[in-house]
Structure formats: structure tokens, C-alpha cells
Image: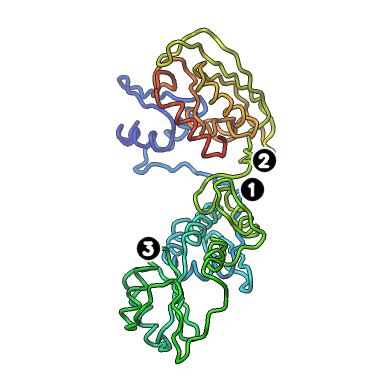
Amino acid sequence: MKAPLEDIKHYMKENHKTLVLVDGDHLILRGPERELSLAVGALQKVEGRSQHPRRGITISSSDTRSEVIVDARHMDILKKLKSREMEVLQQKYGVMMDEEGKDKNVRVTFRASSGAPDLCAHACHSFSSLLQSTIMNLQRKTIYGNLENGERLEQFRTELMKAGLDVVLEQSNGSVTLIASPVLLDFAEEKLQEFFKINDVRGAVTPRRDAEEAMDTTGPPETKARAEQEKCPICLDQMTNKKVLKCKHEFCADCLQKCQDMKPVCPVCGVPYGVVIGNQPDGTMKVTTSTQILRGHPGCGTINIHYDIPGGIQQKNHPNPGKPFHGTHRTAYLPDNREGREVLNLLRKAFDQKLIFTVGESRTTGAKDTVTWNDIHHKTSLQGGAAGFGFPDPDYLKRVRDELKAKGVE
């Protein structure tokens, strides 16, 4: 090879799953068979060049969304609070964001900029996460006082922006409603009090004091407190058709459905709800036991889990619908004790929900269109410790429980 050896090694490390060895005047490549043929072809192109060729990539967005329906009110608040983050998001993914509709709902659509790869689905997912994390964390507080001066209010708004404080101000008939996260809300109220020299603005709503204050006939304090608790954390309005999740958080049924379209987790605490179904191809899960003792688990035998996922044709929820995929046969191990059997039952539940495997690119071999693990780690060796996917590994059972819980299996 004419190219410097270090350049070749760097190129192989960055672009191919191969190990580069030197034996005299021979260059030896080791790796998956498919990668070796690609690597040899690439090296022939590298020969005699001063720069390394780049391996072309294809990014598929099949069966992924590049648009989302957003409540118009939420969209307005998001643009006021997170305009900088939205600009960064468009630059990061090389997309343009279009909005359609202004009454009740806004359709937000992402399209790739000229010459950029199509990362619209990724941009849409990041936008949905930004929207959900922003809106779910907002509170509002209405302040009454001498606030009719629109010019002064605009000066106050400018001061907040210069300080980098994400607070929305809405003026109405001598009052100002602050919308922000709980921490910023108290700070913004204090600054508003100083700026307009208003006294007694500490309450959530401070009543206006006219020459003769009207009697409050809206109900006893406990009734108003209960009504305040009945507000939906999503739309910040009175609850309609209330839906209670297993984490005890409550929402309007329609609001929750919109969030469920983004991700089936509680918008407040992130706990999964309902039954999550994956895209694992059909297969079997069989269990046997043996008397072999696993290191780190004395006094018990071993549970052997045999997974068999035959090859087939990819469906619409797989990366390349209509194309064939390669199946797999995997064996995993658990200690045959109480905790091991509990984890086995959770794994069986996850298998029934099609969450154990998926179709994609193998992280170890680089093979594409093949059945791979789906982020629920298994012990595929009887020994070797954590680094060798085996035992002993004292934290494994706890880790796999956490991974299962993250997918709603517990």
C-alpha cells in the first residue's frame, strides 16, 4: 500500500468493522466475511489517494413520522419559550419546520433542507420530546395591580429575555399572567413586583382591590382548592373525561391520547402505561433447567432459555418492509432461584409482547436485515463475567429488571 499505515488503520476503524494487522509487507484484515469484501474494495480505492474515500450511507425513514399535530395554544407557548432550541433542532438535523393551521390544532411538518440527508423523522421525534418536556413542566400565576402600561410591560419582557429567562407574559385588563416552570415562576413574580412596585403579589391570584371589594361567592376555600387540583397538567384547564394512570397522575382523556401518540408514558413522571407491543418477528421461547451451578449463585442450578426466531419477510414496522431477514437461535442463562425465576417470568412476558428481539443491524457482526437483541440484556455465556456476557455479575438481575421496567414490563 502506498498510503501511510496509520491512515489505513484509522480509515478501517472509522468505516469498517475490521482489525488491521501487519505481517512483513503483508496487510492482514480480520472481521466478518461481508465486511472483509467491502474493506478490500475500499482499500483498492484508497491506494494512491491522499484522502480517504467515504463510504456512502443510506438513511431510511420508512414507517416513521415526520409530522405531528400540536395544540395551537401549546405551539404558541413553545415558540415563545423555546425558540432558540427549535432553531438549533432544525440546524442539527438539516430540516425546515412548516406549520399549518392556527385555530385549535397546528400541523407541524419537517422537510429536509436542500442537499441534506432525510432526518425528518429524527427531527420530529426530538421536537415531540421538547414539546412534551416543556408543556408538562409549566405553571401559571395571575398578578393584579397597576399593570396597564403596555410599554413598561414590554420593557420588563425584554429584561427577562436578556437574562435568558423563559417566561411567557400575557396581559389582560390590568392583570398579567406569568407562564413558566415552577422555579422561574416565583423568581419572575418577584422581579415583576420590583419592576412595577406592586405590593402583595405573593398569592397565586391576588384580587384587585377597588373602592368596595366585591364579596367572593364562588364557593368555600376547600371547593376552590379541589377545583384547582382538578386541572389537567397538559392543557392547564379543568379536567374533562378524566383518565387516571397507574402512577396516579390524572389527565383529560383527549390530552393523554395526544401524548400517547408521541410515546406511551406518563407525561409527568415518565412511567410507562398500557401494554407496549414491539416488532419482534414470530418465534418460540423454551425453558429447560440443569444442575450446573453459576458462579456467584451457589446452592442453585441453572435456567436455560432457548430462543428460536426463524427468518422471514420484514413487515411494515421493520426497517426494510418486503425484504428478507435472517433468523437467529440464542441461548441465555439465569440462576434457578427465586429471583431468577421472577426475572424469567418477566422475560416471558416481554417475549409475548414482542420486545426481546427486533430486526436491524447486528452490533457485533455488522450484518444487516437480521434478528438482533432489543436492549434487554441476556447472559449468553456461563462464565466470563460481565465483560464476557456471563457470570459472575452481581448486579445483572437488578439491571435487567430496570431494562424491562423501562419497557413497561414489571
Secondary structure category for the residue under label 3: helix
Callout 2 amino acid: Pro
Residue 321: image tag? 2
Callout 3 amino acid: Val
Residue 94: where, in percent of width, then height? 48, 58
Secondary structure category for the residue under label 2: loop
From the image, state whether disc 3 or disc 1 is nearer to you: 3
Residue at the spot of label 1: 63
Q: Is residue 46 above or below residue 221?
A: above
| Label 2 crowd (10 A; few <14 / some 14-19 / many >=20) | some
Taking the spot 50% from the left edge, 59% from the top edge, the residue there is 136
Q: Is residue 201 above or below residue 274?
A: below
Q: Quadrant of the C terminus?
A: top right
Nearer to the camera, 315 or 303: 303
Residue at the spot of label 3: 183
Taking the spot 46% from the left edge, 26% from the top edge, the residue there is 397
Residue 77: where, in percent of width, then height? 50, 69
Give the Cα separation between the discs numbered 2 and 3.
47 Å
Of labels 3 and 1, earlier in sequence is 1
Callout 1 amino acid: Asp
So how many labels did they put on this image?
3
Q: Which residue in the rendered view is the most extreme toward the top?
A: 291
Of labels 2 and 1, earlier in sequence is 1
- Asked whether the residues under the numbered discs 2 and 3 touch, taking CB atoms below 8 Å apart as contact, a structural biologist would say no
- Asked whether the residues under the numbered discs 2 and 1 touch, taking CB atoms below 8 Å apart as contact, a structural biologist would say yes
